[in-house]
Amino acid sequence: MTHGFRRTKVFLFVLIYIHSYFVVNSALQVSTRDSQESIADALESFRLTNFVSLLRKSQLLELFQGIGDQFTVLAPTNGALPKPCRGLLETNITSLENLLLYQVIDSGGFTIGNLVSNIQPATSANFTTLEGSRLPIHLLSNGSLLIGYNNVSIIHPNIIAFSSVVQITNGL
């Protein structure tokens, strides 16, 4: 009886291990919907209309139309940009440009896996943004990332757009 129980226990352990391996790795997979899209196309196809309209207003959208540059764009969801906040930003173009450029890491298109690799073995690292400031990204013990001083999370990772990557976040 104990031999059969031990076999069942080992079998269950193997199944749990395989399941957890695929769950973790699928969370890190790259979204390869259409890697030939520009960043602007990817933002529009994911209906990030508030972020795109702010990029248009600041005349920064053209920056994301082409290919060749390697950016990591931390694009907030529409819900992360409430209307009063958008209205305030639209009245001050310089602040708007600075905020939007702070959402872009200028060296390399970082997938979640690349970000984690650049942070480890530490628990945080600073990445330089197009705005010129350092953006802290923290690696938690559960493997998730917190971005910036507002502890923003990535909710839709690894959208490839040419040689860049868009990470959709839940805030600024």
Image (cartoon, rainbow, N blue to C red):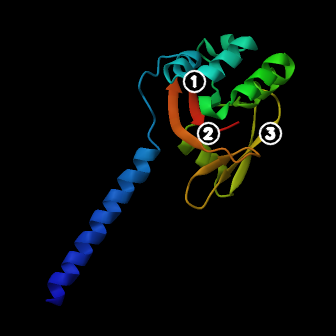
Q: In the image, which disc is placed on residue 134?
A: 3
Tell me which amino acid carries mark 3: Arg
State how far apart marks 3 and 2 are (Cα).
Answer: 20 Å
Q: Nearer the viewer, mark 3 or mark 2?
A: 2
Q: Nearer the viewer, residue 2 or 44?
A: 44
- Element type where label 3 sits in the image: strand
Residue bearing the label numbered 2: 170
The residue singled out by tag 1 in the image is 48
Instruction: From this view, report whether residue 38 is shown above or below residue 156.
Output: above
Seen as rendered, the residue at the extreme bottom is 2
Does residue 19 appear left or right of residue 120 in this picture? Answer: left
CB of mark 1 within 8 Å of CB of mark 3?
no
* Type of the residue with mark 1: Leu
Residue 167 in which image quadrant = top right
Location of residue 67 with respect to 86 vertically, above or below = above
Secondary element at tag 2: loop
Q: Which badge, 3 or 2, comes first in the chain's sequence?
A: 3
Quadrant (top left/top right/bottom left/bottom right) for the N terminus = bottom left
- For the question of whether residue 162 can be seen, the reply is no
